[in-house]
Image (cartoon, grey):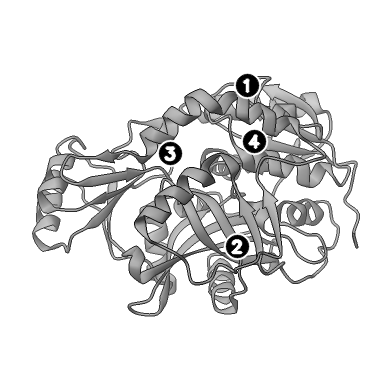
């Protein structure tokens, strides 16, 4: 490997909320741990897959819901920093953590290393309305959207809308309040929309978007890490083959596919808004008008980031650590054709996609290599722990995510 990481500066996985089966955190622990970087993680308990990794120095058991007050979370994070005893690179795995770090940079700066950004930017990017406004301001295509403020607004929208439409929660912090919808929800009819909307209260916290039909679309992802001046340190593009729940959820299977046009679009947008650090973008290519439309902007590490690695051995987490410790990030081309598989959700996703008849035209017939989300020969315990925690409750959870909400012909999928 043509670089050495600073082994005196540890990394800390920061997560708020109860989602113990998170393969992204395990991937980050392995990625830096294999370079000799001491790794720490905040975990729900001592028996999460992340807590069982051989590359983890210590798990800080700190159950949170995501509904705590920011002051409480900041103080808890500082307490973890004091226990580590030296500045650590923060690696957030959810929007709550990314936004908290950005909005409390001064309080956290003495204990931790992290990219400095405009404090309100990550919250705006994580918000569906904030992202839509930024896209409009900078000429980046995104789905046509409406942001109703009342039930009457929804009725007016329903009179003119072309169905089906998609409903999503407007703000990122849906764990802090009762969410209007349980993830990305496809609504087939006007009657179905009005029925659902009756449960959304006086101020519906939703965005209603045009539906981009999967028969005329392709799902693309961009993972990247940007320097303080918003220039790319590492930038990768790939295509999502399968997700769970189908077509609207977490990546279950993906490939690295070179896409210079998409890479340029992402880099220009990041430069325009002045973001630095790791990003995970979801875009849909609409064959009807030939444009890539930005669906989601996650201002943090994505769970499937280990799909992407350059020929010089750099992924976005390694790029972040190298940059924040003052080391150069070596250039290198991405591993085109490389595949990523999330073992516990790809099999049900495969069965569902076969029934739907959907295939992506960009998946290579023979991958150049495969990265498994959970299993690793040098670190098997996270995989075994995942199986032990997943088999019974996990199967029930998959069913709940996939089942169709029959009210008004809606389909709900977690994102």
Q: Give x and y (percent) for residue 412.
A: 31, 43
The tag earlier along the polypeptide, 2 or 4, is 4
Asked if disc 3 and disc 2 are in contact, CB closer than 8 Å, the reply is no
Asked if disc 3 and disc 4 are in contact, CB closer than 8 Å, the reply is no
The tag earlier along the polypeptide, 1 or 2, is 1
Asked if disc 2 and disc 4 are in contact, CB closer than 8 Å, the reply is no
User: 392 or 302: nearer the eye?
Assistant: 392
Asked if disc 4 and disc 1 are in contact, CB closer than 8 Å, the reply is no
Give the residue at x 48% y 51%. Answer: 350
Residue highlighted by disc 2: 255
Q: Give x and y (percent) for residue 345.
A: 52, 42
In the rendered image of this protein, does residue 219 appear above or below residue 303? below
Tell me the CA gap for discs 1 and 2. Answer: 35 Å
Residue 62: mark in rendering: 1
Give the residue at x 75% y 35%. Answer: 111
The tag earlier along the polypeptide, 3 or 2, is 3
Q: Choose mark 2 or mark 4, whichever is in front.
A: 2
In the rendered image of this protein, does residue 213 appear above or below residue 55? below
Q: Choose mark 3 or mark 2, whichever is in front.
A: 2
Tell me the CA gap for discs 3 and 4. Answer: 16 Å
Q: Give x and y (percent) for residue 288.
A: 33, 77
User: 369 or 95: nearer the eye?
Assistant: 369
The tag earlier along the polypeptide, 3 or 4, is 4
In the rendered image of this protein, does residue 112 appear above or below residue 65? below
Residue highlighted by disc 3: 173
User: 201 or 120: nearer the eye?
Assistant: 201
In the rendered image of this protein, does residue 50 appear above or below residue 124? above
The tag earlier along the polypeptide, 4 or 1, is 4
């Amino acid at each position: 490997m043509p670089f050495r990481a600073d082994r005196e500066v540890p990394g800390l996985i920061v997560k708020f909320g109860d989602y113990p089966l998170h393969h992204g955190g395990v991937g980050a622990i392995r990625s830096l741990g294999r370079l000799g970087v001491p790794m720490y993680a905040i975990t729900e308990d001592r028996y999460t897959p992340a807590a069982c990794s051989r590359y983890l120095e210590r798990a800080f058991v700190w159950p949170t819901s995501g509904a705590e007050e920011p002051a409480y979370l900041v103080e808890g994070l500082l307490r973890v920093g004091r226990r580590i005893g030296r500045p650590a690179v923060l690696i957030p795995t959810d929007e709550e953590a990314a936004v908290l770090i950005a909005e409390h940079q001064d309080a956290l700066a003495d204990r931790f290393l992290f990219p400095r950004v405009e404090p309100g930017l990550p919250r705006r990017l994580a918000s569906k309305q904030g992202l839509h406004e930024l896209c409009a301001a900078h000429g980046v295509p995104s789905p046509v959207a409406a942001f109703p403020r009342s039930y009457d607004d929804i009725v007016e929208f329903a009179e003119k809308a072309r169905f089906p439409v998609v409903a999503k929660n407007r703000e990122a912090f849906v764990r802090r309040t009762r969410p209007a919808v349980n993830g990305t929800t496809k609504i087939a009819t006007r009657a179905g929309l009005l029925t659902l909307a009756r449960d959304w209260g006086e101020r519906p916290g939703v965005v209603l978007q045009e539906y981009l039909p999967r028969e005329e679309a392709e799902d693309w992802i961009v993972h990247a890490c940007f320097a303080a001046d918003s220039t790319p340190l590492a930038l990768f593009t790939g295509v999502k083959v399968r997700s769970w729940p189908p077509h609207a959820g977490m990546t279950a299977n993906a490939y690295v596919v070179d896409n210079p046009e998409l890479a340029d679009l992402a880099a220009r947008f990041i430069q325009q808004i002045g973001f630095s650090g790791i990003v995970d973008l979801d875009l849909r290519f609409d064959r009807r008008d030939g444009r890539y439309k930005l669906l989601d902007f996650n201002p943090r590490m994505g769970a499937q980031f280990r799909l992407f690695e350059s020929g010089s051995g750099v992924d976005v987490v390694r790029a972040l650590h190298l940059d924040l410790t003052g080391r150069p990030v070596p250039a290198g081309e991405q591993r085109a054709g490389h595949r990523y598989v999330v073992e516990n959700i790809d099999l049900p996703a495969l069965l569902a996609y076969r029934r739907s008849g959907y295939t992506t035209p960009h998946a290579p017939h023979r991958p150049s290599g495969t990265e498994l989300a959970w299993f690793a020969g040098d670190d098997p315990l996270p995989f075994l722990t995942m199986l032990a925690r997943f088999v019974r409750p996990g199967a029930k959870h998959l069913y709940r995510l996939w089942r169709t909400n029959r009210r008004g012909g809606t389909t709900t999928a977690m994102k």
